[in-house]
Amino acid sequence: MKTSDYKTLLTSQPEPHILKIEMNRPEAANAFNTQMAYELTDLFEQLSLDAGDCRVVVLTATGSKAFCAGGDLKERNGMTDKAWQAQHLVYERMVRAIMGCPVPIIAAVNGAAYGGGCELAACADFVYASDNAHFAQTEVKLGIIPGAGGTQNLPRAVGERRAKELILTGDVFTSQQARDWGLVNLVCAADELQTFALKTARKIAANGPVAVRQAKQAISRGMQMSLSDGLAFEIEAYNRTIPTQDRREGVAAFNERRPPQFSGE
């Protein structure tokens, strides 16, 4: 599927090597329906197969009120158990595609991130949020539990006890609380959010692409291992950077006192 064929996503390249993805269902608070899940899956799976010149992704949404309200409950209204489970398989594939993306992902949360929207943010490598953003894992209020990574990613970000409190109550929490607890890296004014996200994306895009991807993988995989296994995996990732042209260019640029020109090779 070509990105121009997407009905629920807008894609753009605000600067070289930076891909901006905007969830675009403002009439539904950017809740993801089956169509959006398919499109997010398609896009992130494409990035995993061939990222092209993309070195960093900014995941955000249109409008100023909602980042993503989670799964579209109007679409789910009246679903049979079988249909619900079949749809959720699509959501599960979407989450795995986002979390498995080798390219760094910055979530720029510009409004409410409830349920699956909070989970989408937590799937990113790190999160910037506007000062009017709010988060919540509201699934227990619907008789279900977070099923898009929430019970796994949120505890890893904020700690087990805090995550249990948030998930079991379904309480809403502010972007500042999210920052204090470790889910959000930066809180800023709403009109500055995209500027800050792009500023950081620009810094990442200027670094060695192979090195950035290997570092991301070493951190993500290493966090699931013992320290000794993580150290061994780190060296495997490190060794993949040694025979690259980028490694040679980085050292040469340092010694020649000039900015490096990385090619990703």
Image (cartoon, grey):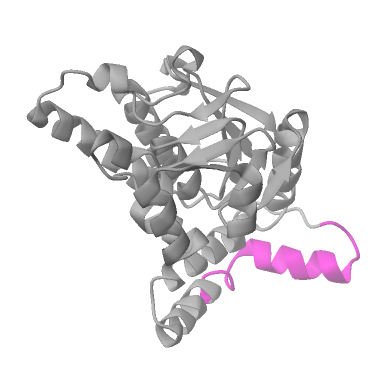
Task: Judge by depth and name the residue closer to the eye, 5 or 221.
Answer: 221
User: What residue is rendered at 35% in x and 54% in y?
Assistant: 151
Residue extending farthest bottom: 228
Write down the quadrant of residue 208 in the picture: bottom right
Q: Is residue 233 above or below residue 38?
A: below
* Side of 28 where 112 appears, left or right: right
Q: Position of residue 213 (x, y in %)?
A: 54, 58
* Residue 234 visible to an observer of this rendering: yes
Q: Position of residue 58 (x, y in %)?
A: 60, 38
The answer to whether residue 1 is magenta is no
* Side of 4 where 144 appears, left or right: left
* Side of 238 where 87 appears, left or right: left
> Which range is magenta?
239-259
User: What residue is rendered at 42% in x and 65% in y?
Assistant: 160
User: Looking at the figure, which quarter contains the C terminus?
Assistant: bottom right
Q: Position of residue 239 (x, y in %)?
A: 53, 76
Task: Judge by depth and name the residue closer to the eye, 110 or 10.
Answer: 110
* Total numbered circles: 0
Q: Is residue 208 above or below residue 53?
A: below
Task: Judge by depth and name the residue closer to the eye, 103 or 37.
Answer: 37
* Residue 46 visible to an observer of this rendering: no
Q: Position of residue 224 (x, y in %)?
A: 39, 71
Q: Is residue 111 above or below residue 197?
A: above
User: What residue is rendered at 32% in x and 21% in y?
Assistant: 35
Residue extending farthest top: 27
Residue extending farthest right: 257
User: What residue is rendered at 56% in x and 50% in y?
Assistant: 104
* Side of 38 where 181 appears, left or right: right
